């Protein structure tokens, strides 16, 4: 498993592009992305569990019901959600891809991200389709990653290389997500491409299994968005024997996918709205996976802990408090907590009670940009991690007036 | 039902006091409160559902298991939670009341609020018991209310007068709570006193019923504290025939209690850490109470909506988003939303989609200090309200470095 450049175009046969079409007023901000496979690909996706679902999700779900897709179109600046004509516009975007590239509208993944409840005008998209498709290239991952950003401050891309059935395969992804992030079953917008050959059912199985430990363990602000989705297109151009059953090849594929998704989770958490720190809570010694996940996520979601981390304050009582209200069945008297960063590790709680520690050393550790909160439950062998960020003045600033 | 002055001393036979004993470093901040009834009283309480429970809660629970109590002692500045000797200290505080006033230690409600996980030294409390009890008076409600404050910016008191069985009764309460507020079954610290005669079982029933629609519908930051409790002492000195069964008198008692608790909820929400606005979300047209409560609370808890309210931004999409992920079974296509304040009311969403509205008028409405978010579900007759506050820079500031 090797990290490689190229993002969503790292895999053979994928091109991408991103342009400014005018949905956003800021001319220097790209707002329309396109990703295309040379040949039809196996497709899988997971979606938000929010009852209020963006129209693009409904259209995408229908389009990939047959397990196939060949292109992804996505705009930022407008979520196309809670609009009377949302479905019509989302279908219109797919039709524009068909017209520009000859790919059937029914083979297009469509996504939108941005403000909810404002009608999306398709005109600027239509006017820029020629520019968008003419510029498709194997170097286009960055442009596409930039075009799906909303309040993100950096584009998010990653790619890996691995071997399946004697063939070198590649998998890459781009993601956007900064606020309204508290995934449930799916998350934010993440587009993954691979040239590995894999049957649609196995692809869906891999994705659904992976997100339980990755995107579903990520929270910026506790708000589950209406437009979250993660999709994978696998076009088989690596030439490996198609993965059609679980086994060694599937395991390798799962590992590649997990490497990618964990990296993207960390990118998203570290770039959470207003964030100055990436937080990772790892819970070990849990009696079962559900407990480990519940506890890790509860800690990562605590506004009080997030604010304490912003202030580099080793207020471990807030960690215990969050464990206590998580709903998980834990033995409080066995809980241990320590904080870790590149500056070192400091235990602060043992057997559910405080232990003496140097506030100075704790401060030095917590002033770093990446903080691990290590919780041991002393009741079993299961471990899970969750990712988030600190709560800062800038989160409030960004969200106090997002629409203007 | 009449609002009267006097707070926790409004009812006959109750005295209170609050002093600075030295748990807090700031000499101008009182940190020890005492409330005493002239005669033994019926007692009821509800407690946090957090698995990590403050030692004082465990001692209080044991002390009022017989339905009786006569005094309340409470310190701020230290939660006496997650300490190896917590129970011993909490029992010690009850013994100090016995020594000072001759009230059995087993008839004392004990509470603590403040930082978790730092040993509580009983010495300053012991040293100030004489001053505390010598100063007990019928004018002592404010002193007690001030002594239980942590990050609260104002003390919280209210009292009402009502008639039961031809006798004038009074009920009053004090509350503290500003952060770590997301009650579950109980909340924050609230001490209520009444001279109305009521049997302990009925008192407990009244309290447990009431909090479902009051303190359990309040959220500042989604963190359920380890030390939340609400207690009521009813000493019967109004001379009414004791309420021993449900019926007209019980209904009147419930109404008085509800008037008090709703007022305290509004006080707490409006004084949420860093808050500039009180938010009240009222959900009507729900198919059942559970749905109404779930939706109201989900809206009030949304960090994104809270930040939007801080910015006076009518970003109603975030209301819909929060309804959608609440877990309640609602028909999105029937949802209506409007914002209301003393400046007027503005509908912003109908049938699950946006409607044109004047951003200027919306801004004017949302710049007020008390904002109502009115949600109609169009599916039944049930209504519930939840209370909270906006998310501000100061919340982050207060919690970024709470311990210092």
Image: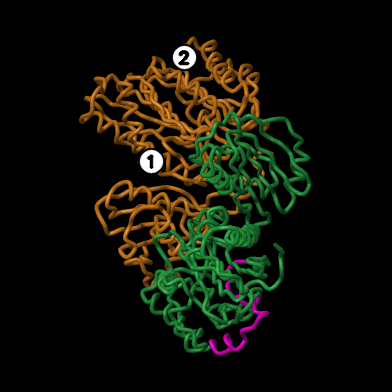
Chain colours: A orange, B green
Question: Residue A404's spot in the image, x, y percent?
Answer: 69, 39
User: Tag 1, which chain?
Assistant: A
The N terminus of chain A: image quadrant: top left
Q: Secondary structure at mark 2?
A: helix
Q: Is residue A292 left or right of residue A83?
A: left
Spatial CA distance of label 1 from label 2 is: 29 Å
Badges 1 and 2, same chain: yes
At horizontal 37% and vertical 65% (from top left) the residue drawn is A346
Where B194 sits versus B305, above or below?
Answer: below
The verdict on residue B147 being magenta is yes
Q: Start and end of the magenta stretch?
A: B128-153
Question: Residue A270's spot in the image, x, y percent?
Answer: 48, 47
Q: Label 2: few (<14), some or many (≥20) within 10 Å?
A: many
Q: Which residue is at the front of the view, B109 or A176?
A: B109
Where A358 sits versus A368, above or below?
Answer: below
N-terminal label among 1 and 2: 2
The residue pinned by badge 2 equals A106
Question: Residue A217's spot in the image, x, y percent?
Answer: 40, 44
Q: Label 1: few (<14), some or many (≥20) within 10 Å?
A: many
The answer to whether residue B124 of the structure is visible from this angle is yes
The residue pinned by badge 1 equals A214
Q: Is residue A35 left or right of residue B143?
A: left
């Amino acid at each position: 498993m090797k990290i490689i450049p190229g993002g969503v175009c790292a895999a053979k046969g994928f091109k991408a592009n991103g342009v400014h079409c005018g949905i956003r007023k800021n001319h220097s901000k790209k707002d329309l992305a396109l990703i295309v496979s040379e040949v039809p690909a196996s497709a899988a996706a997971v979606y938000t569990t929010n009852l209020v679902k963006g129209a693009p999700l409904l259209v995408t779900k229908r389009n990939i019901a047959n397990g196939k897709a060949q292109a992804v179109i996505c705009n930022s600046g407008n979520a196309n959600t809670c609009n009377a004509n949302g479905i019509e516009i989302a279908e219109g975007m797919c039709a524009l891809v068909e017209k520009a590239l000859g790919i059937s509208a029914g083979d297009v993944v469509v996504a939108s991200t941005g403000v909810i409840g404002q009608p999306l005008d398709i005109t600027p998209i239509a006017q820029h389709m020629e520019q968008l498709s003419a510029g498709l290239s194997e170097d286009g991952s960055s442009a596409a990653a930039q075009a799906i950003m909303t309040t993100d401050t950096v584009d998010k891309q990653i790619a890996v290389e691995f071997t399946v059935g004697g063939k070198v395969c590649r998998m890459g992804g781009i993601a956007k997500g900064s606020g309204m992030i508290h995934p449930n079953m799916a998350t934010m917008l993440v587009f993954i491409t691979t040239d590995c050959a894999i049957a649609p059912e196995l692809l869906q199985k891999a994705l659904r299994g992976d997100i339980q430990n990755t995107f579903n363990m990520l929270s910026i602000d506790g708000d589950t968005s209406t437009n979250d989705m993660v999709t994978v297109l696998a076009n088989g151009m690596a030439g490996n024997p198609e993965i059609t059953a679980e086994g060694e090849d599937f395991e390798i594929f799962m590992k590649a996918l997990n490497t990618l998704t964990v990296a993207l989770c960390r990118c998203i958490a570290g770039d959470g709205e207003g964030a100055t720190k990436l937080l990772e809570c790892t819970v070990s010694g849990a009696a079962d996976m559900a407990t480990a996940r519940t506890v890790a996520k509860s800690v990562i979601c605590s506004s009080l802990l997030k604010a304490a981390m912003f202030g580099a304050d080793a207020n471990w009582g807030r960690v215990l408090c969050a464990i206590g209200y998580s709903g998980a069945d834990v033995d409080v008297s066995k809980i241990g907590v320590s904080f870790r960063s590149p500056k070192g590790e400091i235990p602060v709680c043992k057997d559910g009670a405080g232990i003496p520690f140097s506030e100075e050393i704790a401060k030095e550790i917590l002033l770093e940009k990446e903080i691990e909160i290590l919780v041991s439950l002393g009741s079993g062998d299961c471990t899970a991690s969750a990712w988030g960020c600190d709560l800062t003045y800038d989160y409030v600033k960004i969200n106090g007036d997002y629409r203007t």
